[in-house]
Image (tube, rainbow, N blue to C red):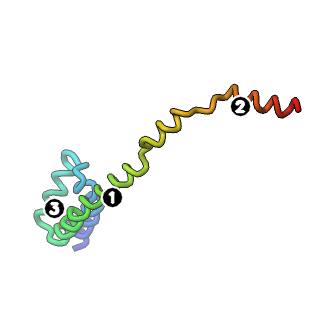
Amino acid sequence: MTRNGGACARVKVLLGVYVLGGLRGTREARVRAHLERCIPCQAEYDELAEIIPFLDMITGAEAAQDAPGPAGSGDDASPSPGPSHGDDYVDADDD
Ligand SMILES: [Zn+2]
């Protein structure tokens, strides 16, 4: 019982990576073999697998919002040159 519980705990740690397809080789094979025999871990895998597409949607939307779009290039179109700003400063000092 205790040994089986330990295996489940180890699989659950790897399950998130496994669902995302991030596991390779022996680890991936071990998780898959465990899932075939273990109903509770299968259930957990199913839950994670259902959530993943939503996570992709959320991160995708956030990335689109954060990405600098036309607004960034608009700023570049009307730049305020450094030297002119320096002249202004000197003029004010002269007065
Ligand atoms: Zn298990």
Element type at mark 3: helix
Q: Amino acid at mark 1?
A: Ile
Distance Cα–Cα, label 3 vs label 1: 30 Å
Residue at screen point 34% across, 54% down: 61
> Which residue position holds label 1?
58
- Left or right: where does residue 79 sit relative to residue 13? right
Q: Position of residue 48 (x, y in %)?
A: 24, 64
Residue at screen point 81% across, 29% down: 90
Distance Cα–Cα, label 1 vs label 2: 43 Å
Q: Residues within 10 Å of mark 1 (few under 14, many from 20)?
A: few
| Sooner in the amino-acid sequence: mark 1 or mark 2 | 1
> Which residue position holds label 2?
85
Residue at screen point 43% across, 49% down: 66
Q: Residues within 10 Å of mark 2 (few under 14, many from 20)?
A: few
Q: Quadrant for the N terminus, please.
A: bottom left
Q: Which mark is residue 44?
A: none
> Which residue position holds label 3?
34
CB atoms of marks 1 and 2 within 8 Å: no
33 shown above or below 70: below
Q: Is mark 3 within 8 Å of ligand 1?
A: yes
| Sooner in the amino-acid sequence: mark 3 or mark 1 | 3
- Left or right: where does residue 89 sit relative to residue 34? right
Residue at screen point 29% across, 57% down: 57
Which residue is at the far bottom? 1
Q: Give whichever of 49, 33 is nearer the camera.
A: 49
